[in-house]
Image (cartoon, rainbow, N blue to C red):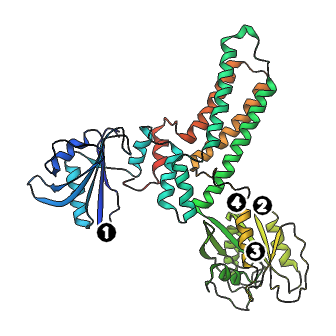
Amino acid sequence: MNDDDIIAAIATGYIESAIGIIRVSGKNSLELLKKIFYSKQEYFEANRFYHGFIKDSNAKIVDEVLVSVFKAPFSYTGQDSFEINCHGGLLIMKNTLELVLQNGARLAQPGEFTKRAFLNNKIDLVQANAVVNLIKAKTQKALDIAFRQLLKQNTTIIEKLREKILFLMAENEVIIDHPDEELSHIELGKKLSILNNIEQLINKLLEYATKGKFFFEGASVAIIGKPNVGKSSLLNMLVGEERAIVTEIPGTTTDIVSQYINLNGIALTILDTAGIRQHSNKIEFLGIEKSKDAIKNADLLIAVFDTSSEFNIEDNVIIDYIHKKKNVIVVLNKSDLPKRSNYPFKFDTVEISCLKKTGLDELKNKLYNILLENYSEEEIVSLNASQTFALKSALSQTKKLKKAYRNFLDPSLISIDLQILADFIEQIIGKIENEDILDNVFKNFCVGK
């Protein structure tokens, strides 16, 4: 596709509303506007609203509108652009868009306006991710963080990475340009120290990206335990309503029950799983298998035990599962009853009573603290899958570079390795030359953005 093409889309979505916006961008887009927009203006000034009428080739009025005009390079896309603010009827928006398309524009692909903003250096890829997050944010905290990312207030780690890599590249070039001065063996320890620091920064960025994922995509929390320990009761207590069926009969939950809650700005999906035990029928067996999948994929586990009953082999099965996971909270339910078991746990424990509704605040605090351990709102970022892969590749490349320095590899070869490292980091911000990769970055945007 030619990036000079005029592109158009319904920016407000094809849904009946009070106002609909047709967004148009591209070289000569303002010439197109003159063909369909009737007002007394011969020349369009930038950053102005104009009142008039959209008319077809037969001078038939399509709608009375306001048109906002933006000129390169001071527009969202960096190109000449305009937006038609028409009435939000479905037929009006359809007719207006078709008229724009008939006069030289083509329908925009998902994310193509933002892609052009990126190609014209209006935003980088970190900011592009922020645009998606602004649209998809489910909580106020996620929205606040997305704004910080859009304004580049939380990219200090990325800038530090670039700065340190550029320092090593510049130092290596000096060695190549002055081979007779025997600089290649000097300050090896300092170079290794810088690479260690780069590793630390990459790991920190990956950690913050994971925490960013919790805010922007949510986190899944699986409640596990043997039958009849209070898993469904705990789900109901967390969501504040009777979402799951609760009975005294073991094995009542034979499928996964899920419910969304907002936990201090994190969209949590709570999963009530089937009790894990030696199943008694095929239906329960299928439920237990689903539970195992949920345990495998969950970001955090809540393991529920009944302290009023004797510890048995089914409890041991649950303990075996949670020892394999990092993020685990052990909940000791039925604390209102006399204790009959002392459970040996290495994990944080919370005593609750689903019957008496006690211990809920402590449990929520522990959930939040485990998911966002060492959390700093100033450094939270959202990275897509390809950017995360690039970061992990940069981490491997850093280890390769340390080995190259220790083995006193020829500076010209080290130069290649440094450039590879720099390219991986540039992929986080946006130096991407492969068109297919770039299209994949913006495919999750909505049409018109």
- How far apart in space, not on screen, are marks 2 and 1 (Cα)? 47 Å
> Looking at the picture, does residue 54 appear above or below residue 343?
above
- Contact? badges 2 and 1 (CB < 8 Å): no
The kind of secondary structure element at disc 3 is helix
Q: Nearer the viewer, mark 3 or mark 1?
A: 3
User: Quick check: 337 above or below 263?
Assistant: below
Dot 3 or dot 1: first in sequence order is: 1
Residue 16 position, x and y percent, is 30, 69
Say the numbered circle drawn on residue 379. none
Amino acid bearing label 1: Ser
Mark 3: amino acid: Glu
Residue type marked 2: Lys
Residue at (35%, 60%) from the top-left corner?
Answer: 12
For label 1, the SS is: loop
Tag 4–tag 1 contact (CB < 8 Å): no
The tag earlier along the polypeptide, 4 or 3, is: 3
Residue marked by disc 4: 372
Dot 1, how many residues are within 10 Å of its Cα: few (below 14), some (14-19), or many (20+)? few
Give the crowd class for mark 4: few <14, some 14-19, many >=20 residues within 10 Å: some
Residue at label 2? 326
Identify which residue is drawn at 73% across, 7% down. 180
The numbered dot on residue 17 is 1
Residue named by callout 3: 362
Point out the residue furthest to the bottom here. Answer: 248
Query: Element at badge 2?
Result: loop
Label 4 residue SS: loop
Lower sequence index among marks 2 and 3 = 2
Within 10 Å of the Cα at label 2, are there few (<14), some (14-19), or many (20+) other Cα atoms?
A: few
